[in-house]
Amino acid sequence: MDDDDLPRVRGDAASQLAQESLDTYSQFELTARIELLEAEIARIRAHSKRAASDRAAAEALFSPRETD
């Protein structure tokens, strides 16, 4: 069985971060964490756009064509 056939683990790092207490962080550390998370969100959005574009191209390539 390939690894691609296995279900993906959903207990990812973002879920773990959301459960972490922020009480011990300084204002500086919180600002740095926000900047890091915003950069990660931008990276994910860019990847999502590329994936949507790739899917649209594949659908256009493999969709049945109308003939006259």
Image (spheres, helix red, strand yellow):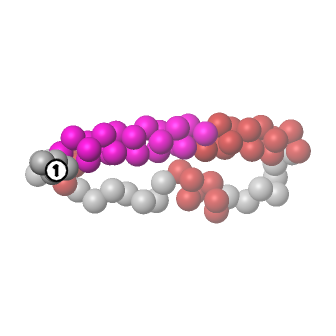
Q: How many marks?
A: 1
Q: Which residues are magenta?
A: 42-62
Identify the residue at image location x=16%, y=50%.
66
Relative to 19, does residue 35 appear above or below in the rendering?
above
**Relative to 29, 48 lies left or right:** left
- Mark 1: which amino acid? Glu
Would you call the spot at circle 1 few (<14 residues within 10 Å), some (14-19), or many (20 or more)?
few
Q: Can residue 43 be found in the magenta stretch?
A: yes
Residue closest to the far bottom:
19
Q: Main secondary structure of the magenta part?
A: helix
Which residue appears farthest toward the right when viewing the image?
27
Residue denoted by label 1: 66
Q: Report the front residue among 9 and 44.
A: 44
**Image height check: is 7 above or below 63?**
below
Q: Give the residue furthest to the front.
A: 68
Q: Quadrant of residue 33?
A: top right
User: Where residue 62 sits in the image (x, y, percent)?
Assistant: 18, 45
User: What residue appears at the point 33 percent right and 56 percent down from the top-left corner?
Assistant: 8
User: In the picture provided, is 60 more to the left or to the right than 39?
Assistant: left
Q: Left or right: where does residue 48 sit relative to residue 38?
A: left
Residue sitting at 42 percent across and 60 percent down?
A: 10
Q: Position of residue 43 (x, y in %)?
A: 56, 37
Q: Identify the residue at image location x=56%, y=59%.
A: 15
Does the magenta run of residues contain 50?
A: yes
The secondary element bearing badge 1 is classed as loop
Depth check: 67 or 16 in front? Answer: 67
Residue 38 x %, y %? 68, 42
